[in-house]
Amino acid sequence: MSDLQSPTNTTAEGTRTGGKAAEEAPTAATAGADQPTATPRRSLLPSSTLLRHLLVLLLAAVGAVVLLEITDPFTNSQLATLTYYAIAAGGLTVLTGMNGQISLGHGALMAVGAYTTALFLSADEPLPLPLILLAAIVTATAVGALVGVAAARLHGPYLAGATLALAVGLPGLAIYFHDVLGGEQGMRVRAPRAPEAFDSFISAVSGNSATNTKWLAYLGAICLLITYFLLANLIRSRIGRTWRAVRDQEVAAELAGINLGAWRVLAFVVSAAAAGLAGGVLALVVRLAAPSGFTLVLSLSLLTAIVIGGLGSLLGALLGSALLVFLPPFVTDLGAGWGLDNTEAAQLAPFVYGVVLIVAMIFAPAGFVGTLRMRWLTRRAKRAAAQPSRG
Amino acid sequence: MTVIAAATAASTLAACGGSDDGGGDGGGGGGDASANEASDIGITEDSIKLGAHFPLTGVAAPGYSEIPTGAQAYFDCLNNEGGVNGRTIEYIYRDDAYNPTNTSQVVNQLVLEDEVFAIVGGLGTPTHSAVLDFLNSEGVPDLFVSSGSLLWGDDPETNPYTFGWQTDYESEGKIIGDYIAENFPDAQVGLFLQDDDFGEDGEAGIREYIDDQIVAAERYTPGNTNVGPQIAALQAAGADFVVGFNVPSYTALSQLTALQLGYDPQWFYSNVGSDPTLVGSLLNNFSQGQVSDASLLDGALTTDYLPTVDEPDNPWVQEFQRIWDECGGDGELTNYRIYGMSQAYTTVQALQAAGQNPTRDGLVEAIEIAGGDWEGPVLAPFRYSEDSHMGTSGMSISRVTGDTTEEVVPVQLTDIGDAEIEPFDGEMAEVPENGIPNEESVID
Amino acid sequence: MQYFVNVTLTGLTEGMVYSAFALALVLIWRSTRIVNFAQGSMAAATTFIALALIQAGQSYWVALIVALLSGLLLGAIVERVVIRRVEGGPELNAVIVTLGLFVAIQAAIAIVFGSAFQSFPTPFGLEGFQVGDNRIALTPNSVWVIAAVLVTMALLVVLFRFTRIGLAMRASAFGQEVARLLGVRVGRMLTLGWALAAVVGSLAGLLIAGGEFVYPAYMDSLIVFGFVAAVLGGLDSPIGAIVGGLILGLALSYVSGYVERGSALVNVAALVILMVVLLVRPGGLFASSTARRA
């Protein structure tokens, strides 16, 4: 679920990028917070990164099943929503968190994935679902590569502007090609039924009934786990280190013979692949691919999720996505509880959401994970200072 | 972000069928609560929970967000009189900001967490499309969708729990086309269309009658506020009669652009976009002595399937005014609120017809059996039956004059496809006591 | 021919509206190196204040002045209370804060003023000028919009190029340390930058609102096109903002007017235009060489 990084490496990262106080926090977060379910004692974990990640994957999978089985159907559906936000935010983490490129247009890449899924599912005899989702990933990756090539030349607000135009421009194609893509009212998506094995699995695990909502939540969770597992490994690999170098030490990286442009494009491609998968899951969960589902708001929400959660950390992306999903209904219900009518309560939700963003950035500029991480590091450093021979 | 055709009400004199005043003593308000049971999800001995999704925030909120406040006021007044069979209505409406992704979430919440008995009046074509399969697979009655798309009623076999309510856009187009063919046979007709199913269905209906008269069809995409090129193209094509299938804000934009260009054709706005009270007064506010003609919309034609606030003498409008004054919130009674109240009225008819202890399937059955005979504020009867879940089938045509409208053609009935257009021979329904219908149960 | 003239003129007017919004973005960018996503909401807020005054019987001009002053105040408050806390931090944090402001202010407007359509009057005529036998798509109101935007642009050019304050503002934006060493009161300059930008934004909001409907989200589509126009011109240049807005307005109007179902292609066209320009000039049309490295 999260990029599990050993504390030693974290410190090393911190030192390498040290001196740039402003970027310290994201980098520390990049190095990742410990998965809460994992054992905090390093010595108990396998030494190989891959094995360690596999172990976390297993624990996270068990955790996901437990979570989905102890919560009610509505929470199940919220968790299904959470999965597609988190998958896309995970991809954006690679791009923005690891490689330092901003994108306000990932919602459009999700649209590519969603429409691909919708098109393949509308066939008379649709392909198996994993193949369809793979197709969604491939299409979004292709579009992402195109955008990435253009984006690699751009910086800061110019990149923001270009991706912003992408966010509103690409869904416009669906309106223009309305015969194929359904126009404004979109393409309805019928998710394939759950396989029989799923029914027996659920009844064996918890005895709950295997509803369609539950099946979609599981589907999303499986995609999420696989995505985060792959991304975590990627981030820890040489590729991930190169991305960070491109972000933090542009000139040095170039001197070292790294082709900055190519690495930026690669980051865009990887994040586009995640966005494509997220779009596919969205289409299944929402049961529709329509332009009004891929507004600028979606792209901006993804960016919000990764910054609020803690830039550069997959766990942060997950937590940030959870905020997107759970905060608005929570505030609406709170407002209704205070005796506001339904309209007033609905207007309260965006207000509180906006205020939360502002307050979070002021008081926890490194995001949830980054802030906790820094606290923890500070404490550890103090302890280490008091007890230098520890180890 | 787009605002799509959903619904606005506008109308003139009503004529609605009726031999007797429908219903006996079976359903009415108050009632005997002792035989009540918690007969299905969302039903207790003393309450019925209903849910809805509307855009309450964002670009589509203006106007549409008033619909549920009208329905809420109606249900509140109903509850003061004892509700339906001794059960009060608990009405929960949630915000989807006109984004299908949100619609899917809030409807999940309504069905799975709030556990409503039925969804009533969910607004918008793309938004409601997202929950169509979910509601039908969960067996949740999906009543009276606030949109004139054909999706809701055309195919009851696939979507047995979903019912349309307002006149569909294709039938409306047919009635408009027929009117033009009869009364303006020499007109060069231009179409100003929203680029989605709303404009498409309307165009299809119109073309059944005046295909050869149409000289231009211009489409705008909601959200793109520059309609200059489209209006200029209609002008350049020599159209002297323009039919608009557009939402109210684009009625205003098209009027302002035409004013700019000195373009003065005969305008005909479909029901969704007309709302002369709203658009007219908004346009007049610009004047401040600048717009030479005090009322830009003056002389424009439009269609109606509900009474409107510009008919203060209409007994239904008077009753709705009373309800709004007694049970409503801030603001004036608007046509959007009348729309919400009328929808709530039909909902109560359905609940009464579903009997003392309604079930979800029973509710659907009751609408199929009895819905075709219901009378109320809606001008023409519904088409509900086992084979069709389409809403009301007819419309009248009226002309905007000053601050009000006058009827040009009384209510006519039609249906989608090649159904004929016929005059409707019924009369306006009488307003029942307290504005509460009194339908008999048709379920054992 | 008349059709071409009219499509051109509507594009011109629409483009000027983008320009007005882009100008405000450029001003904030020049003075604080932040792209302000809350610009639209802030402008909508002051427009609603103006509308409340007009509805209370005040004249348009009184309302205009009060709106501009409240924009000044709002900009200064936002900078002092919120933006100050994230300045110098990671770039993205400032972006998220302005997004938060955007959402919160818009929601606050809906709570205070309601979300119904309201019409915003203009003191100028809405009928096109008569040329020969025809009216053309240029109204006294659009002349007012164009004139107001051009004057504002000229004032900004003068401010930045010929005044000490303008220089100090630029210096504060580019290098706080150096500016401080040179005796510039950087904090004050940043506040001033936001306040002035909010004034320009308020003006843009009022110009856009005149003769149109307003509701809390009425600036939403302009955020995109205004931003695209600013980037097109090169975020650093007031003249670039005007040119960017005009190019965008005209091009979109032609696409809408000359392509079958072109209105649906407008957003796509904006994407294509921006991409082509940025591929040739990654810093926008009027980029100074230093502006490239944002």
Image: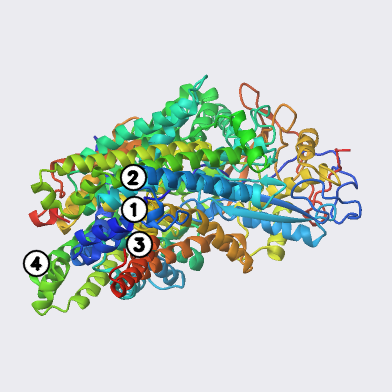
- Where does the image place residue A133, in percent across and percent down from the top left? 43, 31
Identify the residue at image location x=61%, y=60%.
A342
Residue with the most extreme front position: A389
How far apart are the two marked residues, 4 and 3, measured between alpha carbons? 42 Å
Asked if marks 2 and 1 fall on the same chain, the answer is yes
Find residue B342 and report its horizontal and vertical position in percent: 69, 49
According to the picture, the residue beneath numbered tag 4 turns out to be: C161
Image: A128 above or below B26: above
Residue for point 90% across, 45% down: B24
Task: Give the label on residue A48, or none.
Answer: 2
Q: Answer with left or right where residue B136 lies relative to residue C138.
A: right
Query: Looking at numbered disc 1 in the image, what kind of residue is underneath it?
Result: Gln
- Front position among marks 2 and 3: 2
Task: Indicate which label's residue lies in the foreground, 4 or 3.
Answer: 3
Residue at 26%, 35% in the rendered image: A145
Labels 1 and 4 touching (C-beta < 8 A): no
